Image: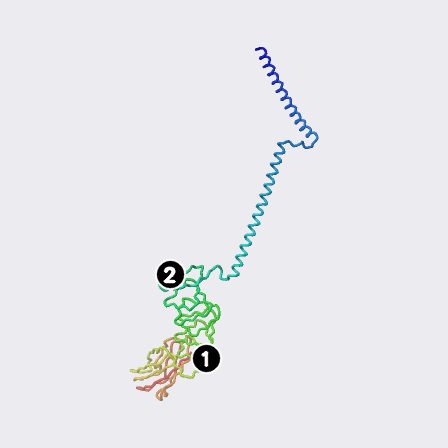
């Protein structure tokens, strides 16, 4: 019995070995067949038939390529939608601005409650983006302070004084009555009506007047007249009284005096004893002339007419002299006019 079992086991082992050898031979045949196929494809230059694994790889690559193309198309679509949205938004904003010239500022009527708050307390109404609209007239009993610019579409009427730190007028302006402390005009100024200056008028440059100048008092440092000078009133030469120094022609105890100015005046002479030819008195000007002036003297009364009088003159003064001795104890006078 045991011999039969061992024989059957050996036969089974031999059968298994034969089955494994048969499997190895089939695998070798398949590998040889694949090698022959690859060699055939190399020799002929034609592609070998696709295997199952190759088909799976090709299928995977096709799906990835399709997904890549789909992503590109999706991005392009989103980009087009974004551009269309921007264009629509800009068009909407422009249409809003065209329909609302005041911009995005909203208006809000002033309610009764807001007016009551303004009357009783110091409060803020609205915000900078809103416009306060008052349909009726408004009266402010106190002061009004505007921290920003003031724009007035109509006329401005001020019942009382108007105080401005500075005013700039770009166009033409009409003023009925204006009181200005200091007026500075950088350009030309044209006055159609009468110019009335209550105080002093100082002109640093040239003054050209086409009409008549009427002045109660005219103070001019230097007056240059190119045409004839017509004076309907008197000529009153102002200025200080010049000084004087007595000469030897007065005699012992003789005196002299002068009244007037550098331009015109009178010299009084009182002779003493022992008179002699020479100068009675020398007049010294308050202000020297630029050159030797013209001096004209005239005796007052017959007492001075008997003298052989003459003058000596220079830019600082002049002297009244006689060529013959003057009568002793006589009083006589001379008027003088000095013109440069």
Image quadrant containing the C terminus: bottom left
Residue 251 drawn at (x, y percent): 31, 83
- Decide which of 126, 148 is in the foreground and name it: 126
Q: Residue 55, how many percent across, how many down? A: 63, 34
Q: Residues within 10 Å of mark 1 (few under 14, many from 20)?
A: few
Give the residue drawn at x 48%, y 69%: 171
Tell which circle, 2 or 1, labels the residue nearer the N-terminal end: 2
Which quarter of the rendered picture does the N terminus lie within?
top right
The one nearer the camera, 87 or 180, is 87
Question: Looking at the image, how many numbered discs can be counted on the residues?
Answer: 2
The one of 117 and 75 positioned closer to us in this rendering: 117
Q: CA distance from mark 2 to mark 1?
A: 62 Å
Question: Where does residue 268 sit, x and y in percent of width and height?
Answer: 33, 83
Where does label 2 land, which residue?
123
Where 141 falls versus 93 (above or below)? below
Q: Position of residue 36 (x, y in %)?
A: 67, 26
Label 1 sits on residue = 212
Relative to 7, 156 lies left or right? left
Identify the secondary structure beneath mark 1. loop
Which residue corresponds to the image point at 59% horizontal and 43% vertical from the top-left? 70
Q: Is residue 156 above or below residue 266?
A: above
């Amino acid at each position: 019995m045991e011999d039969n079992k061992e024989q059957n086991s050996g036969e089974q082992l031999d059968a298994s070995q034969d089955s494994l050898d048969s499997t190895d031979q089939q695998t070798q045949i398949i590998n040889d067949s694949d090698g022959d196929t690859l060699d055939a494809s190399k020799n002929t230059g034609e592609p070998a038939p696709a295997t199952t694994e190759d088909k799976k790889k090709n299928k995977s690559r096709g799906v990835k390529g399709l997904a890549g193309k789909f992503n590109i198309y999706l991005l392009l679509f989103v980009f087009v939608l974004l551009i269309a949205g921007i264009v629509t938004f800009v068009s909407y904003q422009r249409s809003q601005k065209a329909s609302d010239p005041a911009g995005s500022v909203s208006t809000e009527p002033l309610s009764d409650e807001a007016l009551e708050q303004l009357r009783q307390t110091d409060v803020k109404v609205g915000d900078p983006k809103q416009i306060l609209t008052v349909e009726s007239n408004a009266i402010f009993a106190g002061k009004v302070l505007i921290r920003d610019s003031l724009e007035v579409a109509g006329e401005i009427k001020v019942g009382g004084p108007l105080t401005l730190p500075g005013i700039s007028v770009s166009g033409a302006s009409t003023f009925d009555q204006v009181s200005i402390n200091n007026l500075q005009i950088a350009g030309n100024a044209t006055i159609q009506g009468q110019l009335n200056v209550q105080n002093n008028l100082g002109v640093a440059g040239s003054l050209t007047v086409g009409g008549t100048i009427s002045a109660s008092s005219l103070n001019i440092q230097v007056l240059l007249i190119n045409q004839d000078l017509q004076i309907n009133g008197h000529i009153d030469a102002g200025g200080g009284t010049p000084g004087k120094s007595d000469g030897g022609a007065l005699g012992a105890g003789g005196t002299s005096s002068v009244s007037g100015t550098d331009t015109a005046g009178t010299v009084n002479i009182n002779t003493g004893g022992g008179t002699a030819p020479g100068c009675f008195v020398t007049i010294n000007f308050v202000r020297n002339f630029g050159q030797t002036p013209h001096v004209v003297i005239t005796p007052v009364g017959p007492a001075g007419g008997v003298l052989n009088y003459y003058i000596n003159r220079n830019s600082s003064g002049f002297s009244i002299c006689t060529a013959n001795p003057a009568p002793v104890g006589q009083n006589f006078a001379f008027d003088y006019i000095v013109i440069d």
